Image: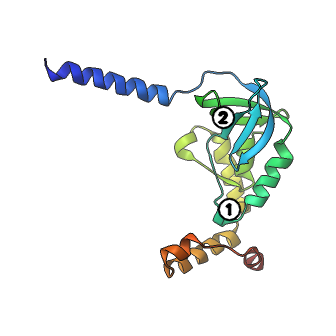
């Protein structure tokens, strides 16, 4: 028995697994109701199947905790989406309970881009390079210095990074930011 047929079979299996794990969804847009805001970039949406599906907002990376925008992000998502019907265009479906998607309000607002436009998230070019709306939203947020692009937040993060260089690993892991310190810089 030669090794070539075995290598061919292994290569085919690896390719099949790759495509299976990274499959793009051919599903059409689905409508559902936002039941809960799970994370800064993940929603629980009920499509009428009894159990909500976890929908991750495709193509974005939300502000980090250190950027201190969590409260504003959750307030925005709660006010804009909780209990409301949305249109979901699956991009990648991991399972029946988990997908990455483009989410739009029934009024047509692209939620993923709105997060970026408000400076609550960054456009993940490596994940969504073809999504021009996200790129435009990021340019607008940068030009208007919103959210993560606010010079006060950028400076505060830089100050924390510099201070962290003089701290032990344990001190860095337990680092907390005083919101009043942020407010005094604005």
Vertical position of residue 13 compared to residue 114: above or below: above
Q: Which mark is residue 148?
A: 1
Which one is nearer the viewer's eye here, 122 or 96?
Answer: 96
- Secondary structure of the residue carrying tag 2 is strand
Q: Which mark is residue 101?
A: 2
Label 2, residues with CA under 10 Å away: few <14, some 14-19, many ≥20: many
Could you tell me residue 100's position as x and y percent?
63, 36
Residue 7 in the figure: left or right of residue 154: left
Which one is nearer the viewer's eye here, 142 or 94?
Answer: 94
Q: Which part of the image, by quadrant, shows the N terminus?
A: top left
Could you tell me residue 63's position as x and y percent?
66, 57
Q: Residue at x 65, y 31 (%)?
A: 97
Label 1, residues with CA under 10 Å away: few <14, some 14-19, many ≥20: many
* Lower position in the chain sequence, tag 2 or tag 1: 2
Image quarter of residue 183? bottom right
Could you tell me residue 134's position as x and y percent?
66, 44
Q: Residue at x 77, y 26 (%)?
A: 50
């Amino acid at each position: 028995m030669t090794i070539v047929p075995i290598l061919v079979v292994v290569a085919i299996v690896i390719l099949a697994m790759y495509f299976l794990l990274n499959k793009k969804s051919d599903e059409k847009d689905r409508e559902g109701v936002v039941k809960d805001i799970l994370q800064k970039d993940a929603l629980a949406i009920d499509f009428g199947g009894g159990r909500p599906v976890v929908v991750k907002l495709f193509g974005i990376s939300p502000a980090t905790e250190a950027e201190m925008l969590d409260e504003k992000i959750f307030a925005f998502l709660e006010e804009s989406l909780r209990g409301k019907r949305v249109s979901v265009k699956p991009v990648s479906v991991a399972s029946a309970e988990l997908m990455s998607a483009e989410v739009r309000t029934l009024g047509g607002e692209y939620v993923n881009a709105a997060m970026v436009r408000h400076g609550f998230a960054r456009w993940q070019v490596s994940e969504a390079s073809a999504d021009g709306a996200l790129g435009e939203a990021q340019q607008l947020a940068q030009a208007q210095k919103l959210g993560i692009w606010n010079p006060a937040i950028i400076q505060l993060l830089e100050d924390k990074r510099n201070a962290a260089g003089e701290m032990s690993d344990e001190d860095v892991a337990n680092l907390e930011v005083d919101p009043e310190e942020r407010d005094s810089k604005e």
